[in-house]
Image (cartoon, rainbow, N blue to C red):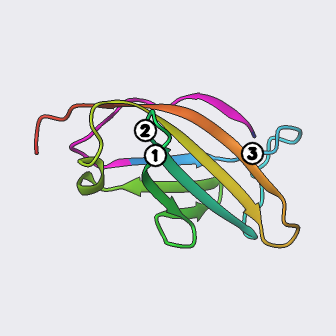
């Protein structure tokens, strides 16, 4: 799985949650992630981390098809409207393999409710 693209726009005054399917490109089946630490960061245009989470801190959770994440409105309020970069890294605790299968843009829209 490699994804270079753009997430759907997210408002900065509401929760941002997604479920990500992780499939084997050759077989089309779900990639077994039980031994992986999954980390995610949202960085601004200067490369400064503005949001982060992982499967170890509970902000990301494994699902049968991949993983899901949720950043509450209180966290999203810390983002100004604009474009951010989302980086997702997988680290296998058994083999030591490290991959960064997702590098994507996240447009953040100014939310009306504060």
Specify whether residue 6 is painted magenta. yes
Name of the residue lying farthest toward the front:
46
Name of the residue lying farthest toward the left:
113
Mark 1 or 3: the one toward you: 1
Q: How packed is label 3: few (under 14 Cα within 10 Å), some, or many (20 or more)? A: some
Mark 3 or 2: the one toward you: 2
Q: What residue sits right under mark 2 in the picture? A: 44
Q: Nearer the viewer, residue 51 or 29?
A: 51
| Spatial CA span between label 2 and label 1 | 5 Å
Q: How packed is label 2: few (under 14 Cα within 10 Å), some, or many (20 or more)? A: some
**35 lies left or right of 58:** right
Q: Position of residue 92 (x, y in %)?
A: 79, 65
Residue at 52% over, 55% down: 68
Q: How packed is label 1: few (under 14 Cα within 10 Å), some, or many (20 or more)? A: few
First to last magenta residue range: 2-16
| Spatial CA span between label 1 and label 3 | 30 Å
Mark 2 lies on a secondary structure that is loop
Q: What residue sits right under mark 3 in the picture? A: 23
Q: Are marks 2 and 1 in contact (CB under 8 Å)?
A: yes
Mark 3 lies on a secondary structure that is loop
Q: Nearer the viewer, residue 77 or 69?
A: 77
Residue at 46% over, 46% down: 48
């Amino acid at each position: 799985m490699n994804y270079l693209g753009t997430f759907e726009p997210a408002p900065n005054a509401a929760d941002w949650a997604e479920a990500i399917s992780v499939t084997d490109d050759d077989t089309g089946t779900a990639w077994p992630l039980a031994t992986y630490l999954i980390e995610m960061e949202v960085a601004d245009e200067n490369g400064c981390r503005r949001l982060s989470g992982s499967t170890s801190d509970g902000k990301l959770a494994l699902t049968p098809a991949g993983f899901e994440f949720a950043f509450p409105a209180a966290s999203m309020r810390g983002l100004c409207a604009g474009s951010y970069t989302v980086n997702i890294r997988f680290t296998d605790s058994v083999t030591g393999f490290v991959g960064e299968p997702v590098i994507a843009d996240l447009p953040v829209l100014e939310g009306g409710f504060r």
